[in-house]
Each structure stands twice: as structure tokens, then as C-alpha cells.
Image: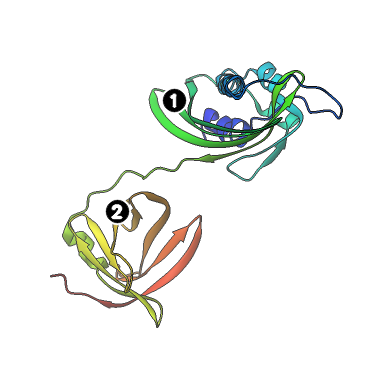
């Protein structure tokens, strides 16, 4: 995977954490919420700006000594591991991260922040745009606010749609069963499949490939049709995060 994405997913992602901790008995100078928001926002953007050039000094300063992060691959890192993974982008790569939708909630010397970050990456001449959702915990120290814990999610997007014709989609029309009591009816309609389940609203699925379909606005799941050796449709799997729920085809259906 592209280096900036790895850094964002693993290093920056789920992970901007603070350098410094609150010691018992220390007196921390009070500040207004407005000042605190400004400092947190500035610190966060500084961390984002330090990702592409691999600026370890910025991260070392703003991460707490006992900082912990969890990335989108469920990898947990400590501060030394975060700093060791921070490297400049390689040849042919150019990118930056912009802070967006910044929302802090401040309770005394602790702040919880959520924000979306917009990534721009020029990957050997191809420009890629991604978004990440960060949730972080900051603590106030005598040296300023430091990041203690962080987690990030990659904001998923709908994939590009394929454009088969109605005749190509009609072979998927029919009734499918999960159990004898749970069934769905599928019909083709233009360049999409309409899925009807009793007692629920109709749902539209758009082709991503010849046999894989996604529901616009819900990119976490896929409907992937299963074929026999002769090409006949035998059912489909409802796949979410790599886990399949299997539906069997009961009967074909004549398209109207």
C-alpha cells in the first residue's frame, strides 16, 4: 500500500498521541476553551504536516511518553513504535493531509477530539484523494497539550460502478433463500438490481464487477453472486468485512 496511506492508517491513523503526562500535585495554568481549541487544532495540524516529510521531532514532542495508538488494521503501537515507523515519502510520492470537521470536547485537563482529515497523494503521477476519521484523547501538561491515545478509521467510499445492460443483469433475477422463512426477490432494473424482502424497503444494488454488487452509500458490504461451472447462478453471498452470509437461489424469475 502507498506509503502515505500506511503512515496515515498506522502511524497518524489511530495514532496521534501526546508527549508528557499529568503528574500528581502539578499546577497547570488555566486557559479558556477558545484557547484550548486553538492549541489542539494547531497541534493536530502540526502532526498531520509532519507525516509526509517524516518529521519525527514534531511527533516526539506532541506524543505523551505512554501514548498508545490503534490503526485501521487493528495494530496497537506505543510511542517508540510510532516514531520508528515515521519515514519520509519515497521517490515519486508527494502528498499532504488537511484537517477538516474538527470537534473537541474539553473536560478540565482532558480533551476528546474527533476530526476528519483529507489526504492528497500524488502516486507516481496519479492523484488519489482519501479521508480518515480520527478520535483522540489529549491531556494538559505543564508543557502544553499532549496526545495520549488515538484511533483512526478510513472513511470508506463507493467504488466505481460497472455498466452492464439489463439483459446481462437479468440472469440474476429470481428468488433466493437464507432460510425457508427468509427469502428475497431480485429483479434487474436498468443498470442495477432491485432486492425485495417482505416487510422491508426495496434496496438497489449497483454492479462493481460482473458478479459483485454494492449498495450506494454502504460500501462496507457486497453482494457477490455464485456461479456453477456452466455459468448458472446458484446463489449469492452477502459479504461484510470478509465474512459471508450465504443465500441459495430457489428459482429463476421471468423479467417483466
Q: Nearer the viewer, mark 2 or mark 1?
A: 1
Q: Residue furthest left?
A: 256
Reply above or below: 43 against 169.
above
Q: Which mark is residue 99?
A: none
Q: In front here: 182 or 106?
A: 106
Of labels 2 and 1, earlier in sequence is 1
Q: Secondary structure at mark 1?
A: strand
- Identified at 45% across, 25% down, the residue is 121
Left or right placement of residue 204 versus residue 20 in this view: left
Q: Which residue is mark 2?
A: 207
* Callouts 2 and 1 close, C-beta under 8 Å: no
Q: Which picture quadrant has residue 70?
A: top right
- Identified at 12% across, 70% down, the residue is 256
Q: Which residue is mark 1?
A: 120
Residue 206 position in % (x across, y down): 29, 54
Residue 93 position in % (x across, y down): 48, 21
Reply above or below: 18 against 156.
above
Residue 222 position in % (x across, y down): 40, 57
Q: In front here: 89 or 227?
A: 89
Mark 2 Cα-neighbour bin, 10 Å: few <14, some 14–19, many ≥20: many
Q: In front here: 246 or 68?
A: 68
Q: In front here: 25 or 152?
A: 25
Q: Secondary structure at mark 2?
A: strand
Amino acid at each position: 500500500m502507498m506509503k502515505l496511506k500506511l503512515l496515515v492508517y498506522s502511524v497518524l491513523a489511530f495514532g496521534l498521541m501526546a508527549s508528557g503526562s499529568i503528574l500528581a500535585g502539578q499546577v497547570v495554568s488555566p486557559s479558556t476553551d477558545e484557547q484550548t481549541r486553538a492549541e489542539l487544532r494547531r497541534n493536530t495540524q502540526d502532526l498531520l504536516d509532519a507525516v509526509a516529510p517524516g518529521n519525527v521531532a514534531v511527533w516526539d514532542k506532541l506524543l505523551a511518553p505512554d501514548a498508545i495508538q490503534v490503526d485501521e488494521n487493528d495494530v496497537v503501537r506505543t510511542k517508540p513504535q510510532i516514531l520508528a515507523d515515521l519515514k519520509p515519502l519515497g521517490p515519486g510520492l508527494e502528498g499532504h493531509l488537511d484537517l477538516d470537521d474538527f470537534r473537541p470536547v474539553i473536560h478540565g485537563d482532558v480533551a476528546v477530539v474527533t476530526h476528519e482529515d483529507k489526504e492528497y497523494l500524488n502516486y507516481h503521477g496519479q492523484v488519489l484523494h482519501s479521508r480518515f476519521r480520527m478520535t483522540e484523547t489529549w491531556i494538559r501538561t505543564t508543557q502544553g497539550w499532549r496526545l495520549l491515545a488515538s484511533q483512526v478509521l478510513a472513511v470508506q467510499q463507493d467504488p466505481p460502478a460497472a455498466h452492464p445492460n439489463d439483459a446481462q443483469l437479468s440472469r440474476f433475477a429470481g428468488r433466493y433463500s437464507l432460510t425457508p422463512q427468509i427469502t428475497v426477490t431480485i429483479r434487474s432494473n436498468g443498470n442495477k438490481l432491485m432486492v425485495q424482502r417482505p416487510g422491508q424497503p426495496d434496496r438497489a444494488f449497483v454492479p462493481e464487477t460482473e458478479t459483485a454488487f454494492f449498495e450506494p452509500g454502504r460500501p462496507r458490504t457486497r453482494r457477490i453472486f455464485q456461479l456453477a461451472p456452466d455459468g448458472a447462478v446458484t446463489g449469492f453471498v452477502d459479504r461484510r468485512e470478509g465474512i459471508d452470509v450465504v443465500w441459495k437461489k430457489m428459482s429463476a424469475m421471468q423479467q417483466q
